[in-house]
Image (cartoon, grey):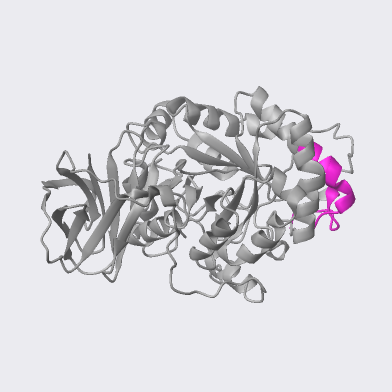
Amino acid sequence: MARKTSRRKFLGLSALGLAAAATPGKLVRPTAAASERRNEASNPRSDISIRVTAGDERFAAAPKAAWRLASPTPGVDQIRLNPGTKFQTILGFGGAFTDAACYTFNRLSPGEREQLFHELFHPSEMGLSTGRICVGASDYSTKLYSYDDGDPDPDLTRFSIDHDRQYILPMLRQARQANPDLFLFSSPWSPPGWMKFNNSMLGGSMRNHFFPVYAKYYLKFLQAYAAEGVPVQALTSQNEVDTDQDGRMPACIWPQEYEIQFIRDHLGPLLESSGQSTKIWILDHNYNLWGRVLDSLEDVKFRKYVDAAAWHGYYGAPETMSKVHDAFPDKEMHWTEGGPDYTDPGYLTDWCKWSGTFSGVLNNWCRSITAWNLALDERGHPNIGPFPCGGVVTIDSQSRQVTRSGQYWAFAHYSRAIRRGARRIDSQSDAAGLGHVAVENPDGQQVLVVTNAGPARTAELQLANKAATVSLKENSVTTFVWK
């Protein structure tokens, strides 16, 4: 049997011919407001608490490090911190509540699920605080479905979210019970098939004369979810606008002019006139499509309704997000999809890869990081699509044993320490092979996450006239916290 092509490889191949492809180059660090240029760092008032994931350790406490007066001669591997230069505010971290993930959670006993949800979502534990909802079926579903299947129904007389009442809505309510600050956004993989040229949810494209009906369809979804006690704070108009996945899964290709027309002339005005506060995020696809975002936002009427750009990490470079921010600094950046393959030998231990991704995303203006499926079984199921994705956690279909991925442990170093409302602060280093990102929490606590994907080494943290020498284990992610 032929091995499945990974999601990353497929999307990379599908993007090779794009005119907007990014040319990787040297990172140009984003600039902050001139009023925040001065270094406001005061002497730290506490020692540095340390948590490490490396080898057999998982977010394990390490001995504290002490600050001292900095030497005139800096250390070899130095990370310089400047809290006076601040960037974006952090919204949070989380994953997708796909039909498959919710089905998998629902297979746990009530007690097992309550324990796992406390671990994943409660602010005292992982504190995951963002979640993605699929509007109808994605590739990670138990079956193909929309909220209005069948023959053309332009009056939406059949519209119903009954499918979601079985386990999706209950899982969302339980997650929000564990974390009342859970921020939810939604993404459709395909409109109902009768709105498309191929009359199928598998691949193809929209008939644009159905745009007004589709806007009403989306509004009915938002209203129905709110009525179920699950309000949705933001939406994207289409998942992965630039591919129809060869018709192998729910998908819909959206040309740039379709996205502009749909949001500018239909969805945006309808949400506005209906009193909906749900934010609109565009693109919901890879970094290499940054040129499309820039060009679309030049349309003033379209830009009026757009709050943010949503990005996937399968192809291109995160630095391109800074190009969009520099051109439109009032538009937010959010990272809305990326996850492991369960077939990857590093599925359980690739925390350095994911932490490097997360620090790169945050250092290029993203306010949130939301992974793909929160949970799947040991075969990456349920799955009606072609990709071998794994969950943030795996729940065995027979034993119900929970296994935590490398991505889970990378998340731990961010979501357990970085609070909603934190501001990213400037961090600089000339040390090769060290990934880093720093933030200041609303209470003044400062956090530095360092990714060392190579051999063990010693590094020096410098904050104003203070310094601290810290050890970085081989292939490690380390979180440093002080006040």
Q: At which x and y percent is residue 167?
A: 58, 32
Residue 192 visible in image: no
Q: Which of 458 and 351 is in front in this view?
A: 458
Residue 71 in the magenta stretch? The answer is: no
Query: How many circles with numbers are drawn on the protein?
Result: 0
Residue at the image point whose x is 71% and y is 34% from the top = 221
Q: Is residue 134 left or right of residue 407?
A: right
Q: At which x and y percent is residue 278?
A: 65, 35
Q: Nearer the viewer, residue 104 or 303?
A: 303
Residue at the image point whose x is 32% and y is 31% from the top = 124
Q: What is the span of residues highlighted in magenta in the rendered image?
A: 194-217
Q: Is residue 278 left or right of residue 318?
A: right
Indicate whether 171 appears above or below 136.
above
Q: At which x and y percent is residue 371?
A: 49, 50
Q: At which x and y percent is residue 245?
A: 68, 63
Residue at the image point whose x is 39% and y is 48% from the top = 36
Residue 407 visible in image: yes
Indicate whether 184 appears above or below 247.
above
Residue at the image point whose x is 85% and y is 41% from the top = 213
Indicate whether 420 appears above or below 453.
above
Residue 209 in the magenta stretch? The answer is: yes
The quadrant in which the N terminus is found is: bottom right
Q: Is residue 321 left or right of residue 245?
A: left
Q: Nearer the viewer, residue 391 or 175?
A: 175
Q: Which of 301 and 174 is in front in this view?
A: 301
The quadrant in which the C terminus is found is: top left
